[in-house]
Image (cartoon, helix red, strand yellow):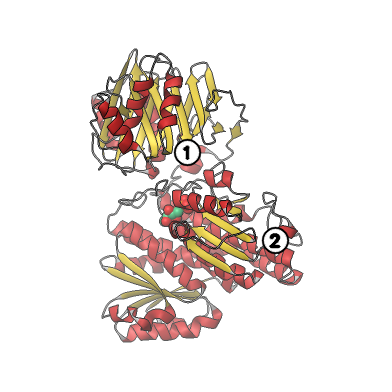
Amino acid sequence: MCGIVGFVGKKQASPILIEGLSKLEYRGYDSAGVAIIDKDHINVVKCKGRLRNLENKLSEHPLKGIVGIGHTRWATHGKPSDINAHPHNSQDGTISVVHNGIIENYVQLREWLTSKGYKFVSETDTEVIPQLIEYFYNGDIVEAVMKAISRIKGSYAIGVICSKEPGKLVAVRKDSPLIVGLGKNEYYIASDIPAVLNHTRDIYLLNDNEFVVITEDGVKLLTEDKKEIKRDVYHVTWSANAAEKGGFEHFMMKEIHEQPKAIKDTMTSRIMMDKPVTLDDIKITKEQIENIDKIYIVACGTAYHAGIVGKYVIEKLVRMPVEVDIASEFRYRNPIVNEKTLMIIISQSGETADTLAALREAKKQGARVIAITNVVGSSVSREADDVLYTWAGPEIAVASTKAYVTQLIAIYIIALFFAQHKKTLSAEKIEALKKEMLSLPVKAEKVLGNKEIVQEFAEKTYKKEDVFFLGRGLDYAVALEGSLKLKEISYIHSEAYAGGELKHGPIALIEDGTVVIAGATQEKLVEKMVSNIKEVTTRGAKVLAFAFEGDKDIEKAADSVILLPKTLDIFAPVLAVIPLQLLAYYISIKKGCDVDKPRNLAKSVTVE
Ligand code: F6R
């Protein structure tokens, strides 16, 4: 969950490292630091807090040198502090390390190193790495890193520099992302592509247990037994601008506005009128589909909420039983999985530790795994049997928006693909569904053009301490996502309930002035939602509802209504989530919160 960068070239490393870290701050922002080799000495500047604190410190103590590493932290072992900030040096100061991940056996390693006379200054797990490397160093930094790694258990992407070999940077990954950027006579390592995009679009995607050795002469990729690896260069097609704010004040607002395009891109070449649903990237055969008797959808957070939509949609269109599970629960409850199970893993980053562990568990038990992910080359994409990429482009704001709607689109695509193979829908029905899907980008654009009512409601709500979301069927799934968006970026306590559950307890919380957001897009359930709205307004609640245009009953029952362009019920979540994202955004702004980097969170949760 942290971000690491590294640079070897002819230019000064410091501004390049800082710029790279600014693109990775979404991964963590508890502290930041850089280490740069100046002749035969490593200088480190690091401090608690946001990257700007580090920039201020560097303006007072500039660092010279053309080889360096940098880090932005999301604290796990050891509180956010100057001392616990990375890079961490070995005892004699000759080796400096940045690390993203967790060293599981650090306590034993720390005790063992302490018995050998090593002294530790931080509370982190990471500090054992430079100390171990120093212990093993015997004139060859690559050898020493390899020996140290063979002693380490856990997940890591590590960047290492050594003042005794000042032109070199060594890196390695296992279960944490790492890419290598290939510039002209200059090279980079980073946890994610945006960090290098201003310099190069040519990158190497690394696999687990691969080592990288960078000097001014180039990049070598090595296996654990020092065999050189040949790797194709991956050329990034999206531009550096895709990872910039592009005129919006926040990434979240920009990404909300990118949704129509992201929806369209995710359907491109997969959903076409009068052509079968084509999934070039999915190799599952008709026979394998026939063999499946159960589907698990497993994910975390927002991706899990997309999974709940998936259950409703797949069960409806494909008539197969679907269970949705939170990845961290799935892996510890001995789920019933076998060769007849299909697992659909959903993960924007493709690096979420719990999701990855669930994928591995299911594969071990014989399941076939399809991954829906946004990141090419991510761990999930490499370990799944099939991958359906969401073409949302880089999502930088910590709160997920465009990734969620593209996950929904990916689910519809998979459902249609299965329905086509299993013939659970007629060809005419599939054509009708495709036609409606293809109209979603324009409809999403229309929803974005109707922000006033959301802004007005945000004005009335931002001082509240609690907000409740209600919905039935797919509106319940959307309610869960709306509630998560609100709590994560505005810090208002919010809960989502299935409308029918209201009277089984939650209604006790409704009092004069309580804010309730109610979804009513599902035709067969609208009447029931009207009753739910009445139940809460009678008790003094103020209700903002979302419903399709022309729904007079809801307009009468609720205090304010967001009217969505009409679509089929199953596609409603794609449109209905947009005003809820906007509501969370406007409330967050009114409260003065940090929209893109909410407290305590990080974009990609690569630890358990
Ligand atoms: C919420 C959010 C998180 C992620 C969750 C899974 O806005 O972004 O709840 O959805 O951490 O992340 P991925 O999809 O990367 O596995």
Q: Which residue is mark 1?
A: 192
Q: Which residue is mark 2?
A: 289
Q: Is residue 417 above or below residue 356?
A: below
Location of residue 133 in the rendering, given as x and y in whole percent from the top left corner: 37, 24
Ligand 1 is within 8 Å of the C-beta of the residue at disc 2: no
- Inspect this view and state whether residue 132 appears: yes
Q: Ligand 1, what quadrant? A: bottom left
In which image quadrant can residue 74 be found? top left
Q: Nearer the viewer, residue 70 or 367?
A: 367
Q: Earlier in the sequence, mark 1 or mark 2?
A: 1
In which image quadrant can residue 456 be found? bottom left
Q: Nearer the viewer, residue 484 or 119?
A: 119
Please give left or right for residue 352 compared with residue 132 in the image: right
Quarter holding the N terminus is top left
CA distance for labels 1 and 2: 34 Å
Please give left or right for residue 323 compared with residue 269 in the image: left
Location of residue 535 in the rendering, given as x and y in whole percent from the top left corner: 36, 86
Q: Amino acid at mark 1?
A: Asp
Circle 2 residues within 10 Å: few <14, some 14–19, many ≥20: some
Please give left or right for residue 322 compared with residue 606 in the image: right
Q: Is residue 368 above or below residue 477?
A: above
Residue 524, numbered circle: none
Location of residue 497 in the rendering, given as x and y in whole percent from the top left corner: 40, 74
Q: Nearer the viewer, residue 349 or 465?
A: 349
Please give left or right for residue 575 compared with residue 582 in the image: right
Location of residue 604 in the rendering, given as x and y in whole percent from the top left corner: 42, 47
Q: Amino acid at mark 2?
A: Ile
